[in-house]
Image: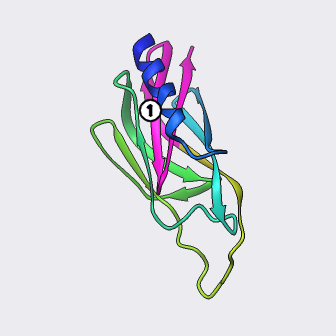
Amino acid sequence: MRLAVAAALGSLALAAPGDRATATFSGSTLTLTLHYEMTCGQPGARLVTITLPSGVRIAALRASLNGKSAPASHSGRTVDVTLPKPPPGATCMSITLGTLRVTLTGLHANSGRYAMTAHVSRHSFAASFRVR
């Protein structure tokens, strides 16, 4: 387990400046908070791809992004959550640090410490969390 956490956290060295992630697990809910540079505060129009550790089981998956329900699918330990499209007709060139909160419910895990990874566009993240 220590090697998995070290390997996941070691990948942070490849992240862009300012990219960081935190994760918490409570009940059957994993909350992943991603901080990275966004255009006009929008997370982008792609997928958030999350690789869950082998000790986490997916039961009835539901996802939300910043508190709003979002389409999600999974294959094995990989979960894809679809990001909303940016508003049409808006032109903005402001790039600032933004926050994206991804919540996955319907997960089960035994007590322990786990490491996971996530990817959004060219941004890569690693985070660990504890299940009590």
Regarding mark 1 in the picture, which secondary structure is present there?
Answer: strand
Q: Which residues are magenta?
A: 104-132
- Identify which residue is drawn at 58% across, 74% down: 86
Q: Which residue is mark 1?
A: 107
In-image side of 2 versus 131 (left or right): left
**Front position in the image: 11 or 65:** 11
Is 73 magenta? The answer is: no
Across and down, in percent, residue 23 comes to 59, 32
In-image side of 75 versus 129 (left or right): left
Crowdedness of circle 1 by 10 Å Cα count: few (<14), some, many (20+)?
some
Q: Would you place residue 47 above or below residue 103 in this image? A: below
In-image side of 77 versus 7 (left or right): left
**Residue 70 seen anywhere in this rendered image of the structure:** yes
Q: Would you place residue 33 above or below residue 88 in this image? A: above
Q: Type of residue at label 1? A: Leu
Q: Residue furthest bottom?
A: 89
In-image side of 92 versus 84 (left or right): right
Q: Identify the image quadrant of the N terminus.
A: top left
- Identify which residue is drawn at 49% across, 12% down: 111
